[in-house]
Every structure is written in structure tokens, then in C-alpha cells.
Image: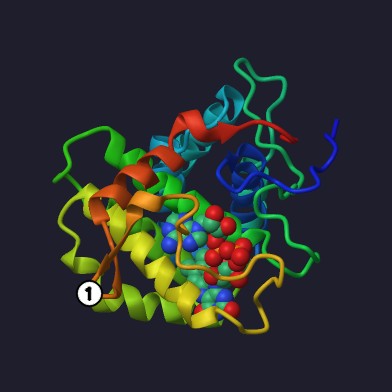
Amino acid sequence: TRALQPAQADRSKVYVADLESTVHYTLRVEAGRPAVLAGAQLAALKCYVATLAKYFPGRPSVQTFLQSLDSWLRNWTEPELPRSALKEAVKNKEDASPAAVLPTNVTWVGCRGSEPHFRGYPCGLWTIFHLLTVQAAQGGPDEELPLEVLNTMRCYVKHFFGCQECAQHFEAMAAKSMDQVKSRREAVLWLWSHHNEVNARLAGGDTEDPQFPKLQWPPPDMCPQCHREERGVHTWDEAAVLSFLKEHFSLGNLYLDHAI
Ligand code: FAD
């Protein structure tokens, strides 16, 4: 059953429907495009699914889906993975015990654009990776595997993201500074500040949804304490931004409203 779409989603919330729609789209649409996956592209898929299985805070049936796909991929040791085998592996197993189900439709809530060609999947992809960097920073030692999630995103975007121009821009940013990230906290902030760089570059352009202008995020009304002014110049209070991101992308801020 599909819930009614809200007139306007609450931008202070993160919606499960956006997250699940994005994971569905990555695994069943983008990863299913090449006839055969091999080499670095197959490694990128394995890495993406392993990261989701580790950190994605899904509903139980979604977590089961991701765990079983992860173990299936780990057991796939042949150099090539044909699309037909992947298609089979990403099917839902409703009758299994426990059930392994990732909804098969795409419903945008927080990521819904004012027109169908605006927002949606690219918004969901940013959201997923912000969420994953924050989830990775919530547990485990801060200095351990600081680049785990960012490298996963870098590889996913490089090998699968359908917007090639976006992928090239992102790869250039990653090559420039990602290796300077030394902790999981810094990984959260790296992704936040580079997403803001992209927002600044795209502001006022023709891919911008007029009802969702590109902002330096979070804007002052969402997080007044994140903003500072020093001698008339705007600066960020990065400690406040980190606390805000950890709260915004926390389990307590995930909403099932309008879930599929
Ligand atoms: P998005 O920018 O998609 O943001 C999604 C949500 O994340 C926002 O609604 C907000 O809640 C939150 N958010 C916003 N900023 C931040 C932040 N700094 N930190 C944390 N959360 C934030 N489009 C192009 O035209 N050219 C490009 O080169 C390009 N490169 C891209 C590279 C990547 C890796 C990705 C994932 C997308 C790229 N896009 C590019 C698409 C573009 O960035 C937007 O995703 C798209 O225009 C939809 O914008 P949006 O308004 O939904 O907000």
C-alpha cells in the first residue's frame, strides 16, 4: 500500500522512503546496467554492499536483505559477475525466514522535487552517504578506517553513478583532499563541506529546483549555532556542525512516514 504523498516534507527529518528508494535504485537499476561486472567495478559493488550491510540502519527485513546479498557477493569469487546472476541475487525473498525484502518501488519524500526531473535519486545518494559517514562515526574507534565510507562512495560514484559529469567532478574533489581525512569525524565533515562546495557551484543553475534553492547547509534557521561571523565574514563552527550532522543523520531522526 502506498501512503499519500505529503504536501511538503519536513526538511529537518530524514525519510526511510528516500533511503530505501535510493538503495533499490543503486542495486537494481544502476548496478544492473552493465552486462557483466568485473575488476574494479565488481570490487566497487562488493564494497558498497559490505558498507551498507555494516552501517545502513534499515528495517529488519531490509537489513536481512543487505546481509544476505553481502554474503552472496563475498562468496562470488569468479572474476566476472553476469547481470543475470546479480538480478537474481537482488530479488526479494519474502518467504524466507527471516524475510529479506527491499521495496521495489521508488517513492521520494524528503527528496521529492517540484517536478519529476528535479531532485530524487541524486538527493537520495547524498543522503545515504551522509547517513553512512555518521553511522560509522557513532560506533567504533574514531581513528580506525577513517576512509571506509568515503572510499566506498568514491568507488560507487566512479563506477556506477549515471551522471558522468557529476562523477568526474566528485572524483576530482576526492583526488585533491580525501586522503587528508584522518578520523571518522573528519570523514563526516569532509563530505559535508564538499557537498556544500557542490551546492555553491550549482546554485542558480538549470538543474536547481526553484522550490529547493541550493543553500550552504544547514542554513541558520536549521542550525543557528553552526554559523559564526568573524569581522564581518561568515565562518562555520565545525564542532557545532558535527553535532548537528550526528543528530540529523541519527536513528532518532529517521521517519517511516510515507514509507513504501
Ligand atoms: P542535494 O544537493 O541533492 O542534497 C540532498 C539533501 O541533503 C538536501 O535536501 C539537504 O537535506 C541535505 N544537504 C544539503 N547540503 C548538505 C551538506 N552540505 N551536508 C549534508 N547534507 C546536506 N549535479 C550537477 O548538476 N552537476 C554536478 O557536478 C553534480 N555532482 C554531483 C555529485 C554527486 C556525488 C552527487 C550525489 C550529486 C551531484 N549532482 C550534480 C547532483 C546535485 O548535487 C543534487 O543532488 C541535485 O541537484 C538535487 O539537489 P537537491 O536540491 O535535492 O539537494
The percent coordinates of residue 9 (x first, y second) are 70, 46
Q: Position of residue 107 (x, y in %)?
A: 75, 47
Q: Is residue 141 above or below residue 162?
A: above
Badge 1 element: loop
Residue farthest to the front?
Answer: 231
Residue located at (44% from left, 53% from top): 129
Residue highlighted by disc 1: 231
The spot of residue 231 in percent (x, y) is: 22, 74
Q: Disc 1 residue type?
A: Arg
Q: Is residue 104 above or below residue 252?
A: below
Q: Quadrant of the C terminus?
A: top right
Determine whether, in the image, residue 215 is placed left or right of residue 186.
Answer: right
Quadrant assignment, res 93:
top right
Q: Position of residue 168 (x, y in %)?
A: 45, 81
User: Is 186 left, or right, of 67 in this rendering?
Assistant: left
Seen at 66% across and 78% down, the residue is 207
* Nearest the eye: 63 or 15: 15
**Observer-nearest of 206 and 217:** 217
Q: Is residue 150 left or right of residue 167?
A: left
Which residue corresponds to the image point at 36% horizontal and 41% vertical from the top-left? 246
Please name the colour scheme applied to the rendered image. rainbow
- Which residue of the protein is positioned furthest toward the top in this rendering? 97
Determine crowd level at label 1: few under 14, some 14-19, many 20+ residues with C-alpha closer than 10 A. few
